[in-house]
Amino acid sequence: MAELTEKQKMLLGVEYFPSNKDLQKERAFAKRICHQFNHHDIDDRKASRKLIKQLFGLCEGAWIEPTFFCDYGYNITTGRNFYANHGLVILDAAPVEIGDDVMIGPGVLISTSTHPLDPDKRKKGIEVALPITIGNNVWIGMGVKILEGVNIGDNAVIAAGALVNKNVAANTLVGGVPAKLMQKL
């Protein structure tokens, strides 16, 4: 059996080296597209959306306010009627699937990446990435941080400033650090 590439390891959710030259090139490509998007003429939103569609793995319909940053882009999929306010960052070493009718407030961070607890592995630069899924009709408030491996159910609301490190059930409101159930909707 052939040895896995660092990209294959990354996508499988096992330890990998993000400093790999091929992964560095892919991140550089995404950063160039993000730079173009963030500095694009605000009156030419059609061209801005074309840049996002070029970057994302699948984009059925998105309106993203600049600034926006991501690691790879191709691991991000969005459903219909997706809106993200200013300052969205998606660290997409693993898939980030966003459903239909999702609204994201300003200053949100979605990160699939994490580092080992073992200090020797951290010194070597090892990383692990786990997918994030955001269901349909979800509202994510300002300044929310969503960590690796989290699934957010349909119709959920994440209160501003929350740190989401566990799955969020459908039809619930969560908030706080770490995010906890505030009420069923």
Image (cartoon, rainbow, N blue to C red):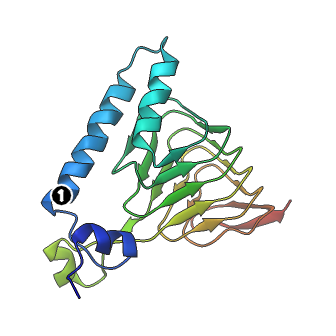
**Residue labelled with disc 1:** 22
Left or right position of 38 against 26: right
Task: Identify the residue at image location x=25%, y=74%.
Answer: 16
Q: Name the quarter where the C terminus is drawn.
A: bottom right
Looking at the image, residue 105 lies above or below residue 134: above
**Residue visible at 22% across and 44% down in the picture:** 28
**Residue placed farthest to the front in the image?**
1
Taking the image as drawn, is residue 66 in sight? no
Residue sitting at 63 percent across and 49 percent down?
Answer: 160
Is 57 left, or right, of 22 in this rendering? right
Query: Does residue 33 appear in this view?
Result: yes
Give how far across and how far down residue 136 sits, in percent.
72, 53
User: How many marks overall?
Assistant: 1
- Seen from the viewer's position, the closer of residues 4 and 16 is 4
Residue 142: image location, x then y, percent: 59, 43
Left/right placement of residue 18 relative to residue 21 reads: right
Q: Position of residue 123 (x, y in %)?
A: 15, 75
Classify mark 1: residues with Cα within 10 Å, few (<14), some (14-19) or many (20+).
few
156 up-or-down from 40: above or below: below
* Amino acid of disc 1: Asp
